[in-house]
Image (cartoon, rainbow, N blue to C red):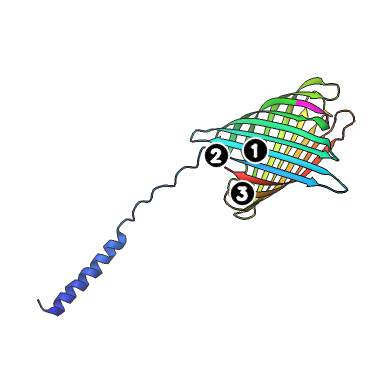
Amino acid sequence: MPPSRIRFVKLALVLFSSPALAQAPAATQAPPPPPPPWAGSAQASFLNTSGNTETSVLGLGAEAKHKGESPWSLALKAAFNQGSDGGEENLRNLMGSVRVARALNEKTDLFLETGYARDTFAGIDSRYGGGLGIARKLTITGKHLLAVEAGLGFTHEVRLPEKIGEDFASGRAGLNYKFVISKTADFQNQFNATANFSDSEDWRLANVASLTSAIDSRLSLKLSHTLGHLNTPPSGKKKTDTTIAAALVAKF
């Protein structure tokens, strides 16, 4: 066969085989692994001043959540704060909660929650109770995420200095908002209002606003403002407490 014809045959084979190669299915990529069932974070904050004013405050907190392939999930929270002014303790509180939830659909959860709190210098010797409620995500994508929840519960509270216990049924409504500022920063606000069905004057408010900025994939800096309002406080105590804190948060 003449050399020219050989070159023509080679060129024809390349031209006709190229589309076939282009249309060949790409190698199947393995799907990404599912997220681990457990996720959480721990945070620590510390403030110490000396000189004209000697103040120290230590804050610790942790959260953990379990969510597997089933519609059930478990959320755990705990926090502890201790502070002193001039060597005399003036702050000590502790709280913890457990929430079990079942997803009814992509946006709606039914939950059962129980919790404990102690705030000595605010006049609360102990407070514990539980409740049943429903949570609804109004948005699940985008930069603005909004969710609401409501529930009914039962509370046992012991106030200082008398240490007299009180039991009452309650209702609670909550609003949770998150603004995703960027891939490494977000703003969150959690608001809750609680009504005492035994005493209409004894309503409570709680609001936590926080701004978080990631340092790397594990560590973040967090600034928060916490407000708690008890409309009928223990004798000699103020109705509203506020806390401003800066914390280092580690994810796991």
Does residue 203 sit above or below 145 in this rendering? Answer: above
At 79% from the left and 21% from the top, the residue drawn is 166
As measured in the structure, the alpha-carbon distance from the residue carrying label 1 to the one carrying label 2 is 26 Å
Upstream in the sequence, badge 1 or badge 2?
1
- Main SS class of the magenta portion in the image: strand
Quarter holding residue 62: top right
User: Given the image, on which type of amino acid does mark 2 rest?
Assistant: Glu
Compared to residue 31, the image places residue 6 above or below, namely below
Find disc 2 in the rendering and name its residue.
Answer: 106
Please identify the quarter of the rendering in which residue 235 is found.
Answer: top right
Q: Which range of residues does the magenta coloring cover? A: 122-126
- Amino acid type, label 1: Ala
* Label 3 secondary element: strand
Q: Position of residue 175 (x, y in %)?
A: 69, 40
The residue positioned 15% from the left and 79% from the top of the image is 4
Mark 1 near mark 2, Cβ–Cβ under 8 Å? no
x and y percentages locating residue 243 in the rendered image: 78, 42
Dot label at residue 173: none
Task: Measure how far apart labels 1 and 3 are at the Cα level.
Answer: 14 Å
> Mark 1 sits on what residue?
62
Q: Residue at x 90, y 30 (%)?
A: 236
Q: Circle 3 sits on which residue?
A: 219
Q: Nearer the N terminus, badge 3 or badge 2? A: 2
Q: Is residue 81 magenta?
A: no
Q: Nearer the viewer, mark 1 or mark 2?
A: 1
Residue at left offset 67%, top offset 45% = 177
Of the 4 image quadrants, the one containing the N terminus is: bottom left
